[in-house]
Image: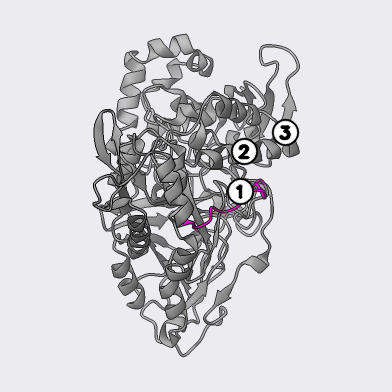
Amino acid sequence: MRKQILKHLAFAAIVISAASLVSCGGNGQKSTKVKSTRAGINEVIIHINSNPDKLNPVTMTNSYSQQVSNDIFMSVLGLDNDSIGAIIPALAVARPTVTEVTDGEYKGGLKIDYELKPEAVWDNGTPVTGDDVAFTVKVYKNPKVDCEQGRPYYEFIKDVVVDPTNKKKYSIYTKDKYFLSELQSGITVLPAYNYDPDGLMAKFTIKDLNDPNKVKAFKSNPDIVKFADKFNGEYFARDPKGICGCGPYAVEKWEANQRVVLKRKANWWGDAYKGKQKGFEANPTRLIYEIIPDYNASLSALKGEKLDVHSALQGKDYIELSKDGKLSEKYNFYKPKDLSYNYMPMNMNNPKLNDVRVRRALAMLTDVDQIIDKITMGLAVKIAGPVSPYKDICNPNLKPTPYDPKKAEALLSEAGWEDTDGDGVRDKVLNGVRTKLEINLMIPAGSPAYEKMALLFQESCKKAGVAINIQVKEFTVMSDELQHHNFEMSSLGWGGVNYEDDPVQLWHTKSYNGGSNYCGFGDAKSDALIDKLRYELDKEKRKQMQMELQQMIVDAQPYVFMYSRLNRMCIHKRFDNAEPKIARPGFVASEFRLNKEFGQ
């Protein structure tokens, strides 16, 4: 529940039953005869593939930053990690009262009334108040702050009015009836005293920061610029002294490319709610995020009992390790459903890929069944579009693209790509130059699964006269290339959170620069549909719009949609209360309770 409301993903309200969480390898039984080097140690070592880019919840952009930040910062509202769409109070005393505004300056929007928990305080002992909420909203609306991915999700906030007689109470007024108004208004809160000690943002009102004409002028305002320069900098992004939230953990140290260590606060205010409200368990003394980009090295660390949690095991390894008697004595193995999916994005503005027939041909040259069988060992399901099959807004009429090399070749020929010189690679005149159908495919370094998938795809394409050049790059480099549209194809996975998708960040044309619309999908029609569904409060009507949008996306084929895998993971048996979750990343390490009898 301390998870920040993510900036670019959302999900629908359905509940995944406990029956979907499948475990093997010990069934949670604690053996008293196991010899373990980790017995009795109340610290959780968690494997992650890459460095967090930042630990600033406003400016961070990758999932590892999100994962590490979950227990440093707190939001006003959270989500139940065991279900989809279930909102629960975090900093708030209860879920807010939401009413429509029918007159006055806020007419046409919503009034969302909050009260914060009286015990909630910052690390310096001062209370968390509505003023901190208002400050955080101003940060997102500061035009010089590096939060292009997150800013659109707070455009709906028109004002924050704090009760002058009780700063724990405040009201958020919205511009309109955005369907995620309640959830998104439950913002992750920053302490103004730490992030703006000079009170620079106090000189501006939220109303001013919503005025396009004033915002244009603010871009050169010295106070706006001064605040943003420091806020965007290293001190608040990576320096433990500058990273400050009201969650149960603080950054003890960050060793770049090695680990991030979070230490449990001695007297955390949230302990008053332990056992009384979901989400306030904070049991381990430390959470250690071990950064191991190379997958094989991470397996060695697991086998050497140097990790307590390893998620996203490859299918073959998951099966073999879970059958390893010595390892399964120490670890429980789980394979819960995962809301993420794997796909290959294509740059629709690239001359070689701007014809939908070429993009569809590449999808038909992707043998997803073979990939699932050989790489995930069957621990995945095919997908047909851009929404997890486990969500109720997923369009049931969409069917996965079939593997059909003959049809793919016909589409390529129809699009004018023929092998005119007999070298085995199709070619075509583009902008007056005869061009080979050679496509660069970026994949992340250190992942044998992505490498195997790329090789299978490369071989299939070769038979059809398409040359695939595999480019292995570090994840941070890949992210930069994608954001600047400096790619042709890539292979990635979208992570998922457990509430309904707001498609603006991925699919609106305004998200092409600064958002996550890497492919360049969209036109006036799709934008209009996105804009309309975002302000439709009737869930059933909105569901139909979501499905219509999915059809438009599939028709344009910006991605090769592949599969949604089960989250193959293992957790050390010395911890109780460590069952897997439907919400990413599949576990909540702060809830783990040490079983002192294990290994004794």
Q: Badge 3 local density, few (<14 within 10 Å), some, or many (20+)?
A: few
- Residue type beneath disc 3: Thr
475 relative to 355, above or below: below
Q: Position of residue 30 (x, y in %)?
A: 53, 82
Query: Which type of secondary structure does the marked residue at label 3 adopt?
Result: strand
Please give the residue where the numbered disc 2 appears in the rendered image. 183
Measure the C-alpha gap from mark 1 to mark 2.
Answer: 9 Å
Q: Which residues are magenta?
A: 393-404
Residue at image location 36% in from the left, 50% down from the top:
251
Q: Are marks 1 and 2 in contact (CB under 8 Å)?
A: yes
- Residue type beneath disc 2: Leu
Query: Which type of secondary structure does the marked residue at label 1 adopt?
Result: strand
Q: Which mark is residue 79?
A: 1
Q: Which mark is residue 389?
A: none
Q: Earlier in the sequence, mark 2 or mark 3?
A: 3
Can residue 528 be seen here? The reply is yes
Please give the residue where the numbered disc 3 appears in the rendered image. 97
Query: Which type of secondary structure does the marked residue at label 2 adopt?
Result: helix
Q: Badge 2 local density, few (<14 within 10 Å), some, or many (20+)?
A: many
Measure the C-alpha gap from mark 1 to mark 3.
Answer: 17 Å
Answer with left or right where residue 538 lies relative to residue 509. right
Prevailing SS of the magenta stretch: loop
